[in-house]
Image: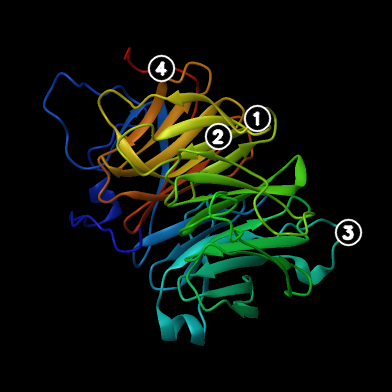
Amino acid sequence: MMSERLQRPMSAASDALSYMTEGGLSDHGSQRKTGPYLEGNMKLLDTIECPIDIMCCRFSADGAHLAVGLCDGSIKIYSPGTGQMLYSLTDEDTQCHRLPVTQLRFRPYTSLDKPEYTHILIASYASGHVKFWHYTSGKCLHTINEIRQVLALALNPDGTHFLTAGADPEIHLYDIETKKRKKTFEPSDARDIMDGHRFRVFAAQFNPNHPDLFITGGWDDTVQYWDVRVQHGHAVKKFCGPHICGDALDIDPLHNHILTGSWRKHSVLQIWDFSLAAKIKDVPQDTLNSSQLYCAQWLGKDSIICGGTDQNMARIIDRGTLNTTGQLVDLPQGVYCIDNDRQSSYPRIAIGSSRYIFLVRSDKKSHYRGD
């Protein structure tokens, strides 16, 4: 994922979006447009241009800030409402290594927490670093060096622990207060049991309803279940199928359903029952635009958002009908990151492609063509 870049020129954000229709219907009977454009009920809110290619993005819990991790190791914090860059995060480590930021998570904060816990951003890097930033002051408060590529981060629901995963099968659990490693999860030596990963791990997600359980996915075409209470540190369950190469693993807290996105030509988007570790359904590809997925996420209670390469697009899907309701198509490069601000039934969405964050929203449920 780090090295793949499609060499298609794109000048400025205004030029890039000159062919877009704001929520209008595309005429697929006419000659195909070139350049990024919108289809269906996806409305463009703003476009943010970053200095270099984007690898990951994340909204803060209140939706007031959008953190964007770049391929040179720097992090930019933007106001989603104005598109203004508010803070830039870099230090001697990131300037020396200049390796990509791979994942971002805002530390949860409540009024009962210590004041110093406000405005904390946790970032992982391909250099092996995990950094705690106080992003309003620009200070790095703590650095962990894992001596491997760190590709995924996950925080437990109450914000007391976090996980890292990456270029080897090991998954590390840390205490967020002390920053000390509490446990390492890995497969056993048994040859006849696959109770852990065999290759790189790109995604990790705690279950919001069961804070001791988390799932992971990666290159070995399995989603592994883990329980922090189990002493042996091996996976307790798994299902096979998804080929996960990015942040394409999500859990719906209402229905306890897992969403997986796979970087491949077939069965790219799938829904699974968490309790049964069984597939519920495949979400069909769009008939005119298909994509190999790097990222996928539940979008409120009623929709799915996903993005990837091949067709270089992002797509919103109605959860009930599995129909496409909106698309951002023909982007300059693949979509490597997506997030939504989780603030309403129709949240603001950030889509990262090349040097650009496209801020969009789906205003209403509608299937824009019969396929």
| Residue that label 2 marks | 299
Q: Position of residue 87 (x, y in %)?
A: 54, 70
Residue 276 is tagged as 1
Spatial CA distance of label 4 from label 1 is: 31 Å
| Residue that label 4 marks | 367
Name the image quarter holding the C terminus.
Answer: top left
In the picture shown, does residue 166 fall above or below 32? below
Spatial CA distance of label 4 from label 3 is: 44 Å
Q: Position of residue 8 (x, y in %)?
A: 18, 54
Spatial CA distance of label 4 from label 2 is: 16 Å
Q: Nearer the viewer, mark 2 or mark 1?
A: 1
Q: Position of residue 274 (x, y in %)?
A: 64, 34
For disc 4, the neighbor class at 10 Å (few under 14, some 14 to 19, many from 20) is: some
First of labels 2, 3 by sequence position: 3
| Residue that label 3 marks | 112
Tag 1: amino acid: Leu
Tag 4: amino acid: His
First of labels 1, 3 by sequence position: 3
Asked which secondary structure carries label 1, the reply is: loop
First of labels 2, 1 by sequence position: 1
Spatial CA distance of label 2 from label 1 is: 23 Å
